[in-house]
Image: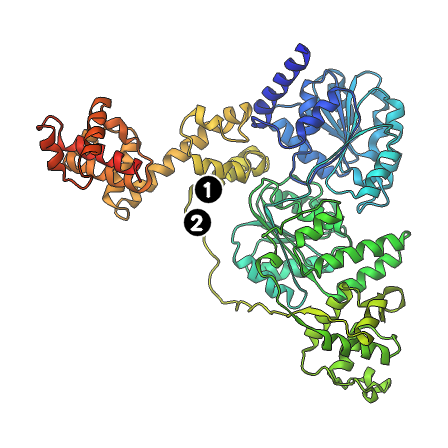
Amino acid sequence: MSEIIDRKRQLLENLKTYFGYTSFRTGQEEIINSIFEGHDNMVIMPTGGGKSICYQLPATVLPGLTLVISPLIALMKDQVDGLNAIGIGAAYINSSQQAGEHNEVFSKVISGEFKLLYVAPESLAALKGIVDNVTISLIAIDEAHCISAWGHDFRPAYTKLGFLKNRFPSTPIIALTATADKATRGDIINQLNLPNPKEHISSFDRKNLSLTVRSGTDRVRKILDFLDDRPNESGIIYCTSRKGTESLASKLATEGFKAKAYHAGLTYDERELVQNAYINDDIQIVCATVAFGMGIDKSNVRWVIHYNLPKNIEGYYQEIGRAGRDGLSSDTLLFHSYADVIQLQKFAMDSANEDVQLAKLDRMKQYAEALSCRRKVLLSYFGEILEEDCGNCDICKRPPKFFDGTVHAQKALSTIVRVNESENMATIVDVLRGSQNANIQEKNYQQLSTYGIGKEASWKDWQQYLIQMTNQGLIEIAFHENSRLRLTELSKKILFEKQKVQLAHIVTKPEKVLSAKPKAKKADTLFEHLRELRLRLSRESNIPAYQIFSDAALKEMERERPMTDEDFSQISGVGKRKMETYGYEFIKAIIGFHKNKRATSKSKIPTYQVSADLFLEGKSVAEIAAKRSIQPSTIISHLCKVYETNQKLPLDELISLDDLKAMTKAYEQLDENQSLKHYFDHFEEKIDYETIRIALTLLKVSHQ
């Protein structure tokens, strides 16, 4: 028992010393305890939930080496740099290094200089020469979904990791990922040969992420509108094609945004330049294919946009999870179009597991077309039930209004019948709208009895109505047959049994008109000043800014304004190494900002607030009066006025306990509306006016 207590104390001490936290996040302590009990672990924890600490913290206490399998060079470099920055010895082995670099790392591993060694699965063979000379205390397999063909980022090299349990049968293995449904979790466990692992599935609910879906029309202008409201924030825009990333990045750059493209068609050096520029805040936006972001832990990504519909919910969830890793409010925006669906269907049909990919795409499509709380749809995919609407998605913020759409449905279903269930959605809409294009003329559809019976609704509205009908099970899309629309058993009840249909009104949000106004300037806040300091220090130290302090830590500094070493150490994310390295600079910046703001804004703030600010700095009433050339009685009036409005002043320090007791008794006996002179006379001039004023202020506020 004493050993467990000592270990817990050491873990908590290291948690604060290295990572700057005083307590564990949900699930972390249970997982870490399981490792020390010798169990294997399967961990599903959302991006930003603190997965890395589940193996990095135990590594600081375990006697030997922690081996981390990681899929991307950039990911392992980012984590190793971050660990070394906080005083934990770590290194990596991958194909980007020369043999001499490998040998240097091996030598330091054997000498015990490192606590963690990161390695790509393809490079595991290179470790044969050292595993017999060191104790492997823990094996962590990060991004474990890559092991499964059921997952969304399948990596063949991951399927060979099953040998690790045979080679190290007594060493705990922890497999971690942010996204894995039940089938994927089972596949991970089987392929890793984990006999009876502990499964830890955290909530997938990232409450700090807003969820918004918009139609895919006029995407560039909508993105510019979105960015116009978010100046100076970092974000990622995911595109399906390489050409799309380059085109969009070019358009954004033309509009004055610092944007670059990232895709597999670039050389390694070109991708490295873009990624490093983004990590170091030299560029604001990366327009990328889906691989980008997997390799970084950048915590200050404030938004993620999907220019195209993702092919499955797992990938979408992991990609939006790259926003708001620090827990601060962040935005996600998904564009959805029928053309995206058709393209992704074609990709899926070319895959080895076509049925699975089409089914997952269908779930993604249902999410994008949802007319109920999107977070409920998203969480239900991972088997998590959200009872209440989230209040932080576009549907919750602007719930749709429904109408009796039975006649609309009957018109659409009748048209599908009359074209013998052989046409796709676009053609059905053309018939309903009475279009006269070549396709309609060639097939003689203008002769149909339903031709033109839907002219009252726009083409886009009809498309949306048909999508709603599909989601309700009234229409079936035969994806493998040119996406022709077919009736279902339910649709026959609409046509022949008078069953009612509810459809949502299509509401078009007024579009903002772009103007030639200049980009918004950075706000003159303490947060922005600390961000500028962080950026300067990061460039001097040649490490990413977010590895110095997260945006969340800077926000806490802005809120708490710590001006001593002790207070600064209490900020979440401030560990021993960071306190020693950066504490002085940040404390100095906080004090300087406070003084400068007071000096430059005295003419703008009320005179009583100036007195209160000086009092909060520790100056006495006499000192404030002398400094401001104002009578002490006036200073007392200022302090009482501020206390009445916000109660943040230690006003009780200006009155003795005996005087306050005497005034309390008099206050209870006399009419509370009596003048100061009445109290002055009541005490036969033994208590002065200033003391009476202070006491009355304290008593009146306490009785409110």
Residue 471, numbered label: none
Quarter placement of the C terminus: top left
Residue type at mark 2: give it: Ala
Residue 523, numbered label: 2
Asked whether residue 241 is in view, the answer is no
Instruction: State left or right for residue 286 relative to residue 136.
Output: left
Q: Residue furthest front?
A: 669
Pointers 2 and 1 in contact (C-beta within 8 Å): yes
Q: Which residue lies furthest to the top in this view?
A: 2
Q: Position of residue 549 (x, y in %)?
A: 54, 35
Which structural element holds mark 1? helix
Q: Where is residue 493 in the image (x, y as percent from the top left)?
A: 82, 71
Residue at 90%, 24% (x, y): give it.
166
**Of residues 435 and 548, which is closer to you in this image?**
435
Instruction: State left or right for residue 640 relative to residue 514.
Output: left
Quarter placement of the N terminus: top right
Q: Position of residue 504 (x, y in %)?
A: 66, 68
Asked whether residue 202 is in view, the answer is yes
Q: In this view, does 54 lie above or below 153?
A: above
Which structural element holds mark 2? loop
Residue 527, numbered label: 1
- Looking at the rendered structure, the number of numbered marks drawn on it comes to 2
Neighbours of disc 1 within 10 Å: few (<14), some (14-19), many (20+): some
Residue at 48%, 36% (x, y): give it.
556
Residue type at mark 1: give it: Phe
Residue 199 sits in quarter: top right
Residue at 52%, 67% (x, y): give it.
514
Q: Is residue 100 above or below residue 282?
A: above
Name the image colouring: rainbow
Q: Where is residue 388 in the image (x, y as percent from the top left)?
A: 63, 49
Alpha carbon separation for disc pair 2 and 1: 9 Å
